Image (cartoon, rainbow, N blue to C red):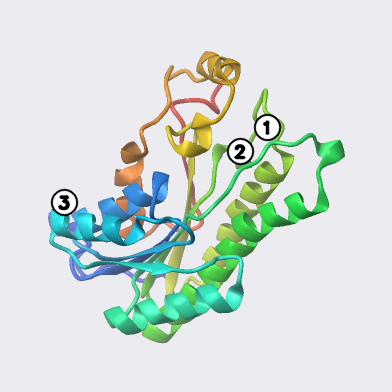
Amino acid sequence: MPLATPPEPSKHVLSHFSLQGKVAAVTGGARGIGLEVCRALAEAGASVALIYTSSKDAEQTAESIARATGQRVVAYKSDVRNKATITATIDQVAKDFGKLDICVANAGIAAHHDSLSYAEDDWQEMMRVNLDGAMFTAQAAGNIFKKQGPGAGSMIFTASVSAILVNIPQKQSAYNASKAAVVHLAKCLAVEWTEFARVNCISPGFIATDMLSVHPPEWREKWFQMIPGGRLCDPAELKGAYVYLASDASSYMTGANMVIDGGYTLP
């Protein structure tokens, strides 16, 4: 069966971006990029399951987005590293909301270690969160999409420009490898899931989140020299891209990796 065709391709362009009546789940949704993704999807009309691991304010955050958008937004605590746990959470979301249309595998961690001294536990933890967690999340959502029928789902992975280049001056071989794997995983799933879902990636560049705020000033100075855009990206500047991939506006787009980096990967 071919990739699903939207109901009315010729209708007004802005209507294609509406997520009215859709249900979305977002891992790592309590802060940083994930928080803005939850906000964006709700602003576009979707009901949202904000999935988090350790945030103390996740429930209040979900309530705040719900009040601001008028959409149903509910926080779910889970752990993407554990297949049974995240599968149960995604299944519960579909049960609570009646279906699942959009899933964003956004949960991730970063660390910087010399490759010659990378500890086994540190390496495995990076892969467990960034790669295994992305796969387990997608697998749970994909099984729901397939049951719901042709063209039922949009799966979106948060990858990174680190998937397609080697960042300097930081040493982050494990992070880079995990994100490169996520991009190729998405391509594989896009081919396998054509009948019931589209699968795409977003690869942000340097985003102004807690993940970057802990780095030495000299690193930031180096990055600014390498980014043609000359600044970090506010997480909210990614909102439109996620809505695009979640909506009918990208109905013929699958297996793509959208790089949003202020030109960082161009020179």
- The answer to whether any part of residue 195 appears in the image is no
What's the residue at 38%, 59% (across, down)?
A: 252
- Give the image location of residue 18, x and y in percent: 19, 58
Q: Residues within 10 Å of mark 2 (few under 14, many from 20)?
A: many
- Give the image location of residue 153, x and y in percent: 38, 71
Name which quarter of the figure residue 144 lies in.
bottom left
In the image, is residue 43 above or below residue 88?
A: above
Name which quarter of the figure residue 64 lies in.
bottom left
Q: Is residue 128 left or right of residue 51?
A: right
Disc number placed over residue 14 in the picture, else none: 3
What's the residue at 49%, 80% (across, down)?
A: 88
Q: Marks 2 and 1, how far apart in space?
A: 6 Å
CB contact under 8 Å: marks 2 and 1: yes
Front residue of 7 and 55: 55
Q: Which residue is mark 2?
A: 162
Q: Which residue is mark 1?
A: 166
